[in-house]
Image (cartoon, grey):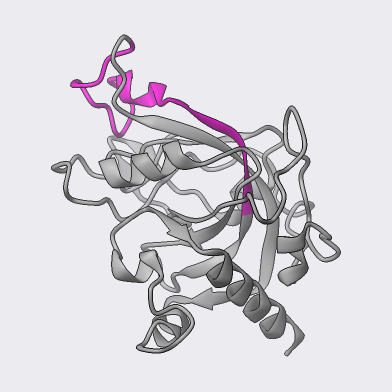
Amino acid sequence: MVSSSIRKQSPDTEPPVKKSRPSKQSTAAKSSVVGVNSVDVKEKGANVAATPVIDGGAPSAGERNYWLMKAEPESRFENGVDVKFSIDDLAAKTEPEPWDGIRAYAARNNLRAMKKGDLAFFYHSNCKEPGIVGTMEIVQEHSPDLSAHDPKAPYYDPTSSPSNPKWSVVHVKFRSKFAVPIGLKELREMGGPGKPLENMQMLKQSRLSVSKVTAAEWEYLMSMAESKAAQ
């Protein structure tokens, strides 16, 4: 899998999103989950398409961390490779998917902080209607991003080597697709002074492709996704 619109930039500039090759499998059977709610945070999962964590159980709610990770759902070519990757592409995968192509240090450091069993929002970026479209689970913790060493890859980095890798990748699995996305406009409205998302990292650092989400922000947004699905 190849990553997205992450351009080669200086270390203090964050890329807008992560990207991947499109899935080669049909997404029709995998995208049937259309509504989720806050019970997902409590591991009851009644309305969530959950995927078991590899090599062990998930952490308890008190130990789990939450994230937001961006990808581009519309075709865009980088070095001759279409880096499109959507929530439906992830849903069609039958094996853990590497979240690769991250080429900014702050986003990379967030990848390295992830633990198996953490949950993340899947965010569609750089498209007509950007926003949070579903959830996924971290099933394998960070390892070197080998795509950085491939001259044919869109985000080849000659300064990184297998003996001294600069970049990292985690592996994720699909958990749910929202019936109705939570759009960027709504997120910004909820991020105003005194509102629930006032301190959300993604809104504070809009170009950060991998950002932290607090437990309170996660519960609030999952409840919002449930409410939108019920309307």
Q: Is residue 144 in the magenta section?
A: yes
Q: Nearer the viewer, residue 120 or 198?
A: 198
Rendered-image quadrant of the C terminus? bottom right
Residue shown at the point (33%, 27%) measured from the top left? 153
Which quarter of the picture shows residue 121? bottom right
Region rendered in magenta: 136-162
Query: Percent from the top left, x then y, of residue 150?
Result: 33, 19
83 in relation to 196, above or below: above
Residue shown at the point (76%, 44%) measured from the top left? 51
Left/right placement of residue 161 relative to residue 1 reads left
Query: Percent from the top left, x then y, of residue 122?
Result: 54, 57
Residue shown at the point (31%, 36%) measured from the top left? 80
Which quarter of the picture shows residue 178? bottom right
Residue 103 visible to the viewer: yes
148 in relation to 194, above or below: above
Q: Is residue 46 in the magenta section?
A: no
Query: Percent from the top left, x then y, of residue 180?
Result: 64, 77
Query: Percent from the top left, x then y, of residue 213?
Result: 49, 62
Residue lying farthest to the left in this orientation: 10
Which quarter of the picture shows residue 37? bottom right
Q: Nearer the viewer, residue 144 or 157?
A: 144
